[in-house]
Image (spheres, rainbow, N blue to C red):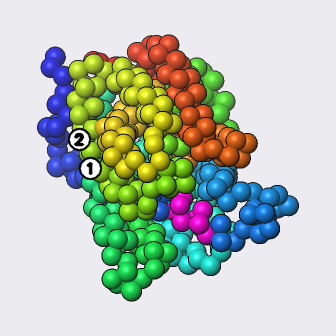
Amino acid sequence: MNAPDVDAAPPVDRALRRERFGWYSYDWAMSVFNTSVTTVFLGPYLTSVAEDAAGPGGRLPFLGLAIPPGSWFSYVLSVSVVLQVVVLPLTGAVADRTGRKRHLLGALAALGALAATCLFFVADGRYLLGAALFVVANVSFGAATVVYYSWLPDLAGPDERDAVSSRGWAFGYVGGALLLAVHLGLFLGAGSLGLTEGEAVRICLATAGLWWGLFTLVTVSLLRDRPAQAAAHATSGFRQLAATLRGMRAFPLTLWFLGAYLLFNDGVQTVVSLSATYASEELGLSQSVLTGAILMVQVVAVFGALGLGRVAARHGAKRTVLGCLVVWTAVLVAAYWLQEGAVAQFYALAAVIGLVQGGTQALSRSLFSHLIPAGKEAEYYSFYEISDRGTSWLGPLAFGLTYQLTGSYRYAIISLVVFFVAGFLLLLRLPVRRAVVAAGNTPPERL
């Protein structure tokens, strides 16, 4: 059998092709939040807002604690995931139990988009408002993504999923790059438009929220619900969640993969979320340089996601992800040694990140889909999403604590190596084909 072609659409009927386009469209819609808000603008901006609000000794008063402004955004990221530990599994249980995924996805995306749009009002030392709005937006982002991911097994067979998942990530990178290009133009031209840099950033944050909400309408209109396995009742979400937690013990190899993914994806998401903070605070790079680098990452990542999808078709998703983790480890070592103000070095490192970022996540998503028992997609993806895009908590916590203890962003960034090494070792030893069969699924030709 020939390896599947990740560039050519598989032969599907018009209805399925329409649904796939709707599914891809949500990656287009939501990726701008991950790119423009979490990765580029909010970290440095909220840090500057926190610095303006700092009291005596340059510390932020919060619940009786004195927090350095440089650690504020990483702690906010961690808090959002503590809440997701409760919200995301419950969301998955409700989605699988009721079968009303379209309504749930639309409601969660609308809430997150509204919170992101309201980040426009974060100014004049309102670091608590910024934190609260981001937590709501990020929790909604994660919960909506759980529902979105759960459609993948319905839209692609075992040998198609790497290609379909990679194509979805490519759509997301194109959408994120287009809006980020507009944001970059707005930020660089702020003075000529009569805006301050802070006002330009606030407009960028708000328009990312509007983009997310508006394009979600396309997704909701094209996707369709599948019948639920059982009728819903008032407490079914909590009961189904409890049943899922008990039932997961019967699939130890699936839990093994989740453990590996939790570790290495915490590292990926922390690098993505806090790279702008590291570059601005430690390397002294300007916001325009950071935005340009992220824009380049978005463009390179389109080809990286599709290219690594093709590599996975020949060599298997597991081997391809393992290779990506080796590259991520090398990226952190190189980041530690980057010279202050070295724009060219930073861009070169960003290009490498772009090549592996999309493939790491797209192939992990499709690989996990093979390890889920039928009818439990949203519930299992809820545990998967707890550590997915911008929702990591161990990594930001390690980064923030290391900075607070050492006062060095270089030590903070190099501390993340442990997540990639530990995740690599766990995934390396996982018998993936046996895990797929144990979950009751048919393995694809190459894993």
Looking at the picture, tell me which residue is in the foreground, 170 or 291.
291
Looking at the picture, tell me which residue is in the foreground, 444 or 268.
268
User: Could you tell me which residue is drawn at 47 percent across and 47 percent down?
Assistant: 340
Q: Which residues are magenta?
A: 42-50
Using the numbered discs, state the Cα–Cα distance from disc 2 to disc 1 in whole angstroms: 7 Å
| Position of residue 320 in the picture relative to residue 391 (left or right) | left
Label 1 belongs to which residue?
299
Q: Check if residue 46 falls in the magenta segment.
A: yes
Q: Position of residue 45 (x, y in %)?
A: 54, 65
What label does residue 303 carry, if any?
A: 2
Q: Quadrant of residue 446?
A: top left
Q: Residues within 10 Å of mark 2 (few under 14, many from 20)?
A: some
Q: Residues within 10 Å of mark 1 (few under 14, many from 20)?
A: many
The N terminus, quarter of image: top left
Give the residue type that dot 1 points to. Val
| Most common SS among magenta residues | helix
What label does residue 87 carry, if any?
A: none
Q: Residue 202, relative to residue 178: is it above or below?
A: below
Give the residue type that dot 2 points to. Phe
Q: Check if residue 89 falls in the magenta segment.
A: no
The C terminus, quarter of image: top left
